[in-house]
Amino acid sequence: MKISEVSKKYDIPVDTLRYYEKAGLLPNIQKNASGIRDYSDSDCERVEFIKCMRSAGMPVERLSKYISLCLQGEDTTEERRNMLIQQRKELIEKRDAIQTTIDRLDYKIDIYYKILKEKENALHAKK
Amino acid sequence: MKISEVSKKYDIPVDTLRYYEKAGLLPNIQKNASGIRDYSDSDCERVEFIKCMRSAGMPVERLSKYISLCLQGEDTTEERRNMLIQQRKELIEKRDAIQTTIDRLDYKIDIYYKILKEKENALHAKK
DNA sequence: TATTGACTTAGAGTCGGCTCCAAGTTGTAA
DNA sequence: TTACAACTTGGAGCCGACTCTAAGTCAATA
């Protein structure tokens, strides 16, 4: 699969894919005789994984660390697991902070609704 | 209240508070004769609000827009409400993306657990 | 064969959000 | 009164994550 196809499939700019590769997130992408990248199925799966992690804000550098551990094989299983546990913890905190803000917005949106309704009523009363 | 006290109270660096002020998030902070900021109670409430919104990733520029509308008075109620509704929508998307990633991490963490347990069992069997 | 469009690289530029620095002023405690 | 910490300003610097540019190569079509 060519880079433009991967880009289209996962809706990630070509430049970003190359940037991820430089950053170590996509190691060992095969290239044909004339130097053109050919993404394998497992490369694509990795792209999809990266997309998911990035969408939640996992830093590129940490992702790079994780993927380099994957390449190192079985001995790193525990360390990788700990990384994921840590990342999970941070995401839960983030999700909860966002939820707190959503709740606050709900409250304020409701207050604004009441103000607008009052205004409207005042207008009707005048008529 | 002095800037250092506000900084301590809300755990926001002094430099960040001044940056927010420059960016229009904290308009009309009073200063005494020698030019030193004196945060009022309502300034503090605003700081707390900003902290909450920023913790969820609301951009400084949008926050600045919102606050400038607040200063413009009643006529902007509807526009402000719409801004909050839009922001709410984006936060829900963000929260859900994070949740999706958490679910995926849970799955992977479990898989790693099983791998580690298997390894351990293999070790016992050898003994 | 000439052109077009997709690919390659290295490296520079951009953006948001801080964070720090230099140089100067003020207020309090020894 | 002098030392020192906390305040002020304008502006520079930093970091993460892209995003773009320049200069060149290659394959396929008019």
Image (spheres, coloured by chain):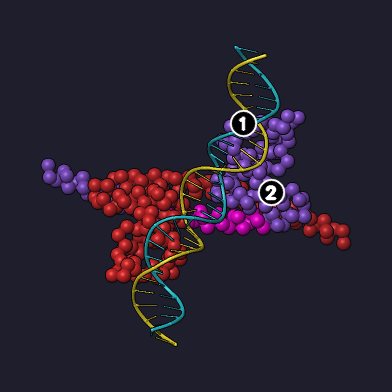
Chain colours: A red, B purple, C cyan, D yellow
Q: Secondary structure at mark 1?
A: helix
Toward the left, the furthest residue is: B127
Contact, CB < 8 Å: mark 2 with mark 1?
A: no
Q: Identify the residue at horizontal 82%, vertical 56% (top origin).
A: A122
Is residue A19 one of those drawn in magenta?
no
Regarding residue B61, the answer to whether it shows in the image is yes
Residue denoted by label 2: B67
Q: Secondary structure at mark 2?
A: helix
Please give the label number shown on residue B4: 1
| Vertical arrangement, residue D8 with respect to residue D18, above or below | above
Q: Is residue C4 left or right of residue B91?
A: left
Regarding residue B38, the answer to whether it shows in the image is no
Q: Identify the residue at horizontal 21%, vertical 47% (top origin).
A: B119
Q: CA distance from mark 2 to mark 1?
A: 23 Å
Is residue B83 one of those drawn in magenta?
yes
Foreground residue, D18 or A113?
D18
Count of marks placed on residues: 2
- Where is residue A116 shown, x and y percent of the image? 74, 56
Q: Quadrant of the C terminus of chain A?
A: bottom right
**Nearer to us: label 2 or label 1:** 1
Q: Quadrant of the N terminus of chain A?
A: bottom left
- Where is residue B9 shown, x and y percent of the image? 60, 33
Please give the label number shown on residue B24: none
In this picture, which residue range is highlighted in magenta? Answer: B82-105
Q: Is residue A107 left or right of residue A8?
A: right
- For the residue marked with disc 2, what is the amino acid? Ile
Q: Chain of mark 1?
A: B
Q: Identify the residue at horizontal 69%, vertical 38% (top origin).
A: B43
State which tag comes first along the sequence, 2 or 1. 1
- Where is residue A11 shown, x and y percent of the image? 45, 66
- Where is residue B83 shown, x and y percent of the image? 65, 56
